[in-house]
Amino acid sequence: MKLLEKLSVYGDVEYQEPLSKHTTYRIGGKSRYFIYPKNIMCLMSILDILKEEKITFRMLGKGSNILCADEDYDGAILCLDRYFNEFYFEEDGTCVAQAGTSIILLAHEAMKKSFSGLEFASGIPGTVGGAVFMNAGAYRSDIGSILTKVFVLKDGICTWMTKEELAFQYRHSIFQEYRHWIILGVELKLTHGDQKEIRDLMDSRRKRRIEAQPLDKPCAGSVFRNPPNGQAWELIERIGYRGKQVGGAKVSEKHANFIINTGDAKAQDVISLITMIQKEVKQQFDIDLITEVEKFNWKQ
Ligand SMILES: Cc1cc2nc3c(=O)[nH]c(=O)nc-3n(C[C@H](O)[C@H](O)[C@H](O)COP(=O)(O)OP(=O)(O)OC[C@H]3O[C@@H](n4cnc5c(N)ncnc54)[C@H](O)[C@@H]3O)c2cc1C
């Protein structure tokens, strides 16, 4: 059986799939395989096949925190957002969700059931898996603070890992050190709240985001982590880079910590702009700005 046919037994498989279709930056070369595994057993079979064929793989959620290189990726991307998107709420506020679930959808479903805790996530356009990997957060909250455990496939074994084992910090989790571990699902602990208050908070934050962020342009959210005791956008503003453009990539006029794709940006344009900002901020303020956006398939 040809490899493509073999993989297709266990999932939906696209061949030579443009990653620009799967990233919010709308940037990226083609991936040799792009696979949606049908369930956990299928995922494990796919991993066995890839290992046998010596094909590297990488997980992708909704591609909302990723800058893919312009070059093609000679491996497989595994994406859980088609078949791993079920979630369940218990009466006491325990929520179990599969890793491919949209975190925005989950926040809305929690609100409909009058559960509080996920309000911060209602504007974060990723999956539950991507949110755990990044410890995504906003408004002084993050997924790490409402999570009790994560269901993980590591080294061929499915197991629950407790919050204490996950090394959550600001935009950091242990999964950034163990990139071959696959997040399959989470258990969150939400609290009972007033539905109207939860909805009003989510609505007001959505309005604030629309006002403050360039949501009408392809981007990947904040490009840099905030340095200790500071705001990345403020430093970028102070070096005079608001509106600065390289090729098709531009520092947003609306929010200086967002780099937008004006239409035909290459990944290289975005990286050039990132490097220029880092150099200038270092020179002027002796601060190392660290990227929050993840680079994928870059040679160096
Ligand atoms: C407009 C906009 C606003 C944003 N606002 C915020 C914000 O307020 N706060 C914030 O924290 N982020 C924000 N982001 C960034 C982004 O949405 C988050 O980081 C999100 O959690 C990424 O989820 P994802 O599913 O898109 O992950 P991806 O970008 O697809 O992947 C991110 C990383 O997670 C890994 N990964 C994904 N799924 C799995 C899995 N199942 N198992 C193992 N590894 C996995 C990937 O390999 C990759 O390394 C914003 C982005 C945009 C475009």
Image (tube, helix red, strand yellow):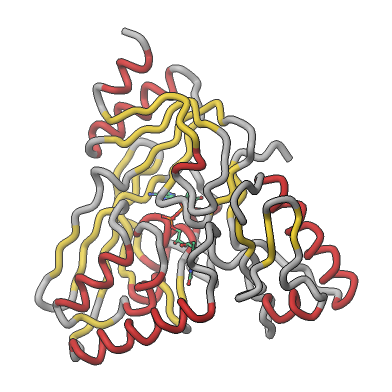
Q: Nearer the viewer, residue 148 or 211?
A: 211
- Which residue reaches farthest front? 263
Q: Residue at x 27, y 44 (%)?
A: 82
In percent of width and height, residue 220 lies at 54, 59
Drawn side of residue 127 relative to residue 276, left or right: left
The quarter of the image holding the C terminus is top right
Tell me where residue 203 appears, x and y as whole percent. Answer: 32, 83
Rendered view: 154 above or below 64: above
Is 25 on the left-hand or right-hand side of 194? right
Q: Is residue 134 above or below residue 209?
A: above
Q: Compared to 27, does 116 lie above or below?
A: below
Left or right, 275 with respect to 290, comes to right
Depth order, front residue of 114/41: 114
Q: Residue at x 32, y 36 (%)?
A: 36
- In this view of the protein, which residue sits in the foreground, 153 or 132? 132
Image quadrant where one finds the N terminus = top left
